[in-house]
Image (spheres, rainbow, N blue to C red):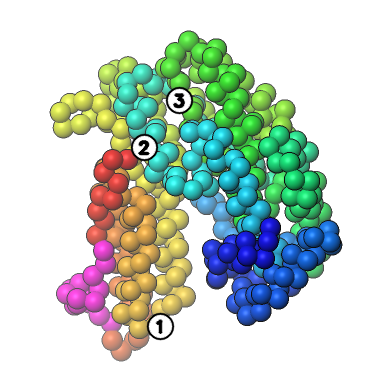
Amino acid sequence: MTVEYLKETFSLMNRRGAPGVDRVSMTGYGRNLDDNVADLVDRMKRRAYDAPPVRRVYIPKTGSDKLRPLGIPAVEDRLLQAAVARLLSAIYEPIFRDSSFGFRPGRSAHDALRRVREAVMGGRVQYVYEADIRGFFNHLDHDWLMRMLELKVGDPWILRLVRKWLKAGIADNGTVTHPEEGTPQGGPLSPILANVYLHYVLDLWFDKVVRPELRGKAEWVRYADDVLALFENETDAQRFAQMLPERLAKFGLEVAPEKTRLIPFGAKFWRQGKGVAGTFDFLGFSHHLGTSRKGQMTLVRKPTAKSVHRFFTAIKQWLRRNMHIPPRDQQRILTAKLRGYFQYCGLWFCAPTLKKLQYQVTWTWWRTLRRRSQAHKPTWEWFVQRPWTKLPAPRLCHPRV
């Protein structure tokens, strides 16, 4: 944790990050970076560093009208968290299991989707257990986490820093509270802490305890706190469904019953006819079994209705707020938004849904332009013939996923 290491870490951070409770921005902190970092290192060496409160903000929650709380650390605190996160990543990446995909370098949601597809198309998976951990980031047990970190981290100052951050106050509307559990989402350290916790709670447990007792083949796929267990044997799947809540309860966690279920999903159910095999959602895609042109079973993934609705709603809100900016600027920004969404959703079988979404965005944009003026209301025919109204078409971006 030297001056050079912290300056290198600062160069890797997002310059557009929001300020914390002290209202110091990344740009403001970077203007006098050498002195600021030297002072930070000096306070750490004197054990005089104290974690400031985290600023609480709320953002819309995925697929819901509720708000998700985020914690925004001060810039200096964020820098130190990012530096510690880099150290912990170097320690834990070699021992994390291959079944874990979220918040890890060189791994993505598409890697997790590919693993699911390979397991299903391998022919031996017949049951899928879909589980969601209720409020994981809000209920992570501090004492258990520290015991887990102590297994690999020998530096007491690093451990002391982590505990300071876990106990740091949360500033919300003028009041400061000190949490007894959980870790605020939004800080650079939260993802690696979540992975460490679930590595010991779930990943190792499945490989060392659950898998040796199974009668058939099984696959375990975890992306952050979203988990899938895929089984060949029904008895194995039912037994695991009973074991998982007990395992989570030991570490202060619980499954969300409304989002947790055991689904028949495999070749033997596909052969019985349409509608026998179930469907499940994972990482923004709805998964179901279909028939290929050759008459064989295939895994069909399409963007979930919630995902499409959320994206389309965000587009409409953006157009409403930016109704009067130049149309060509609107086109440039809409193009970037659609390309980003199409890039993520560019899997086989997704094109019809994405083409419909493209048309809806184009139509909504035209309706927005018609509201700009009472004197000039462009017709649909005039609008679609303008070269500057063209929006990108969806394409297959992940042919092997």
Which residue is at the far bottom?
Answer: 375
Residue 367 percent coordinates (x, y): 33, 72
Callout 1 secondary element: loop
Q: Is residue 397 above or below residue 325?
A: above
Going by the image, does 77 lie left or right of 395?
right
In the rendered structure, does residue 386 fall within the stretch colored magenta? yes
User: Where does label 3 land, which residue?
Assistant: 219
User: Where does label 1 land, which residue?
Assistant: 324
The residue drawn where x is 45% and y is 21% is 218
Callout 2 secondary element: helix
Amino acid type shown at disc 2: Arg
Q: Which mark is residue 114?
A: 2
User: Rounded to the nearest whole Å, what is the CA distance between mark 1 and mark 3?
Assistant: 52 Å
Q: Which residues are magenta?
A: 377-392
Classed neighbour count for the residue bearing mark 1: other residues with Cα under 10 Å, few (<14), some (14–19), many (≥20): some
Q: Which mark is residue 247?
A: none
Q: Mark 1 and 3 residues: CB-CB less than 8 Å, in contact?
A: no
Camera-near label (2 vs 1) is 2
Of pointers 2 and 1, the one earlier in the residue sequence? 2
Residue 365, by quadrant, is bottom left
The residue drawn where x is 34% and y is 62% is 338
In the rendered structure, does residue 264 fall within the stretch colored magenta? no
Q: Do we see residue 283 in this rendering? A: yes
Classed neighbour count for the residue bearing mark 2: other residues with Cα under 10 Å, few (<14), some (14–19), many (≥20): some
Going by the image, does 233 lie left or right of 244?
left
The residue drawn where x is 48% and y is 10% is 215
Of pointers 2 and 3, the one earlier in the residue sequence? 2
User: Rounded to the nearest whole Å, what is the CA distance between mark 2 and mark 3?
Assistant: 12 Å
Residue 256 percent coordinates (x, y): 61, 35
Of pointers 1 and 3, the one earlier in the residue sequence? 3
Callout 3 secondary element: strand
